Amino acid sequence: MPKIRTVIADDHEIVRHGLRTLLENEGCEVVAEYSTGREAVEGATNVKPDVVIIDISMPDLNGIDATQQIAKQVPDTKVVVLTMHDSEELARKVLEAGARGFVLKSDAVRDLSTAVKTVFGGKPFFSGKISEMLLRGYLGGSRKTEAADNIPTLTPREREVVQLLAEGKSSKEVASILGTSPATVETQRAKIMQKLDLHSVTDLVRYAIRNHIIQA
């Protein structure tokens, strides 16, 4: 049976090394490692692995938005999200982005290789605690409130701009990363602030944290 070709995306080298060792000991082939969400998207598009394992808290492009782009650009590649946050809301966002697996870092030694093999086989996989949360949420009905439904939705590009600005990058740096002009970034920034009714960079950072675009 051919080895499952996997990619690891995490911004900590020591974590990537540990995950590589874990997966290779279980018979998987790690074909690439990346340290930012943007690198993960570009790499997955070029390498076309069977499975991408990605942390949610990634610089330049967070794991949720990177997952969404990978699912769109490389639909045959399955994504397993790895995180320390056991939030039902976060799990729902991960599912909506197109991930097929959700593994808590605290369960990685026990669950990660099983998750990779399960999603490769065409079935979803969730750490036990997350499965219980999702089941309780399903049985309890939707938790969305009318107020939440009225929150303006950002486009994928607007979310990218929000993350980069919230990480402290200048308009010039954002423009360089996104391949556009500083003037365009300034225009996008103004539209985002108006759309979300935000009035300062601090407000923007708080919004990014609340909506899992960046982690505190």
Image (tube, rainbow, N blue to C red):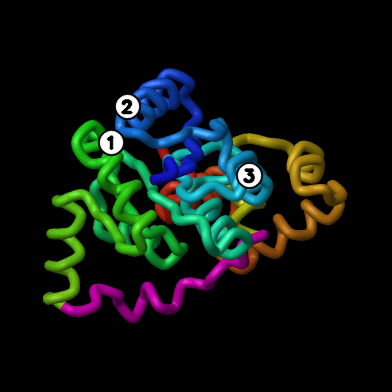
Residue indicated by mark 1: 105
Alpha carbon separation for disc pair 2 and 3: 22 Å
Residue 210 horizontal/vertical position (percent)? 40, 52
Residue at 18 percent across and 59 percent down: it is: 131
Residue indicated by mark 2: 25
Residue at 55 percent across and 64 percent down: it is: 75
10 Å crowding of disc 2: few (<14), some (14-19), many (20+): few
**Which label is found at residue 113?**
none
Q: Amino acid at mark 3?
A: Val
What is the quadrant of the C terminus in the image?
top left
**Which label is found at residue 47?**
3
Residue at 55 percent across and 51 percent down: it is: 66
Upstream in sequence: badge 2 or badge 3: 2
The answer to the question of whether label 1 and label 3 lie on touching residues, with beta carbons closer than 8 A, is: no
> Secondary structure under badge 1?
helix
- The magenta region covers 141-157
Alpha carbon separation for disc pair 1 and 2: 18 Å
Upstream in sequence: badge 1 or badge 2: 2
Camera-side residue of 159 and 13: 13
Q: Amino acid at mark 2?
A: Asn
